[in-house]
Amino acid sequence: MNIEELEQFVLAFTSRLDKIDGVLKKRGLGANMIPVFRCGASGLYFPHDYVKEWGKKYGIGLGPHPVSETLQTEYEIPPTVTKETQSVEEIMHPLLVCQCQVDWDLVDESEAETKWAIPAEGDQKMLKRVPILRAKQLANPRGKLRIYQAEFARVNNVERGF
Amino acid sequence: MNPTVIEDSVSIPAGVTENVITLNNSLRKFLNAAHDGKCRFAGVQSAAGLRLDLTIGSKLFIASSEPRVGTDLSEPYDVFNDNMSARRGDQFTLRANNTTGGALTLRFRLVNEALKEDGSSLSEQEWAQVDPDDRTMQRGPVSIADGSVDFQLLDGLIWDRPPVPCHLEAFMTASAAGMTKTLDVEETNIIPPSAIAPNNRIPLDPDDAVIQGVEVADRDLILLAVTNRSGGALNAFWKTKLTEFARQL
């Protein structure tokens, strides 16, 4: 096959994508599918404009190249308890922006609804994301959070005379 | 004489931590300068939300500054200030304010290099010969609405009017293309409206420098302004480095 024939062959498909769309829809394939960007670490989804809006709606301060802005836990760094710590709710392993690769994907709309990442732009103080990650830290056997919380509660009970 | 290196990756809980160095008991022995020296400080944070102040002895060198978001500390890019004097016995106070609701990691390195080979103290005459110090501030992201101007990014910060005559070096980046900056000292325009590199990060020294060697008299107002005409909200990042004309004894 020479290059002209190859070009005609490719054009025969690409110029009639509307027909291919029609065939897929008739068979129920592709219906309800939406484009997303998937975080390589957490598997959570970002909207289709994630890369286009990089530095505007997403990824503020994370450099010029799009990466995932989901938060992960640094289990290797222990929680810090200071004299200013007032309650067990303040004790946790530190969080980090994972900055891993994001991949474009087509996923079912109903599946995506359950896996949207919380954008950092709407949660700068992390008030929505911290409770989710604390719950994960408590459940994760790698975490030392339960040990620290129990010790904090024990010391405070002793100090208060319980 | 070997330099003293204080280096750690530490979890900073929500709220204010008065001295980060004391969070690690093994670093407490380095809390006071072991010799007269020149210090440099570098740091990165795991997610946006930390603000740092570094005081050596009674002198503030880094004020209300935000580190780059990253997991790897690289010099010289992540150095806040590499020209700070410490006298033997001066205490290093690294204050951190975590403005978020969760814990964040601060990776930092504070190096004190002796001014004399044998580590002995300098006389006052010798101190007068040492290079003057730098004072730095770095902030971002600062949100700028579309079609608006922020007339003073340094508004309300400690060194918008330097207390002593100094040379100013400025660094800037924007989160995306479409912003312009201007720099004025009192009524003199230093940088006319010009584009800001869209590197979307805390400015790196020296990559994101926009000007250096600007003379600023004591109490002169430094005006760093940005304009956003991109069609959507953008964020600005900036850093100022003030080098004293003469050593302050």
Image: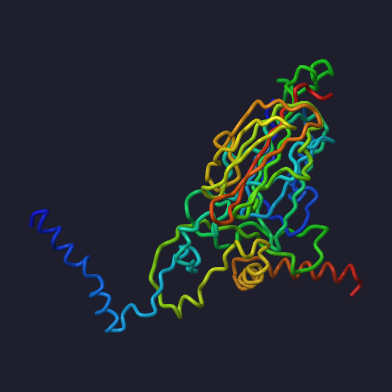
In the displayed structure, does residue B89 sit left or right of residue A48?
right
Q: Is residue B37 visible?
A: no
Residue toward you, B146 or A38? B146
The residue located at (27%, 75%) in the rendering is A21
Above or below, A27 relative to A152? below
Horizontal and vertical percent position of residue B210: 59, 34
Above or below, B23 relative to A143? above
In the displayed structure, does residue A65 sit left or right of residue B203?
left
Q: In which quadrant will I find the C terminus of chain B?
A: top right
Residue toward you, B74 or A59? A59
Q: Is residue A129 visible?
A: yes
Residue toward you, A2 or B2? A2
The residue located at (56%, 41%) in the rendering is B196
Would you identify the image quadrant in which residue A159 lies? bottom right
In the displayed structure, does residue A101 sit left or right of residue B153?
left
The residue located at (85%, 71%) in the rendering is A157
Horizontal and vertical percent position of residue A46: 49, 66
Horizontal and vertical percent position of residue B68: 61, 47
How many marks the image carries: the answer is 0
Residue toward you, A122 or A89? A122
Above or below, B246 relative to A79? above
Above or below, A74 relative to B53? below
Q: Give the image's coloring scheme.
A: rainbow
Judged from this view, the residue extending furthest toward the right is: A161
Q: In which quadrant will I find the N terminus of chain B?
A: top right
Would you identify the image quadrant in which residue A149 lies? bottom right
Horizontal and vertical percent position of residue B89: 83, 33
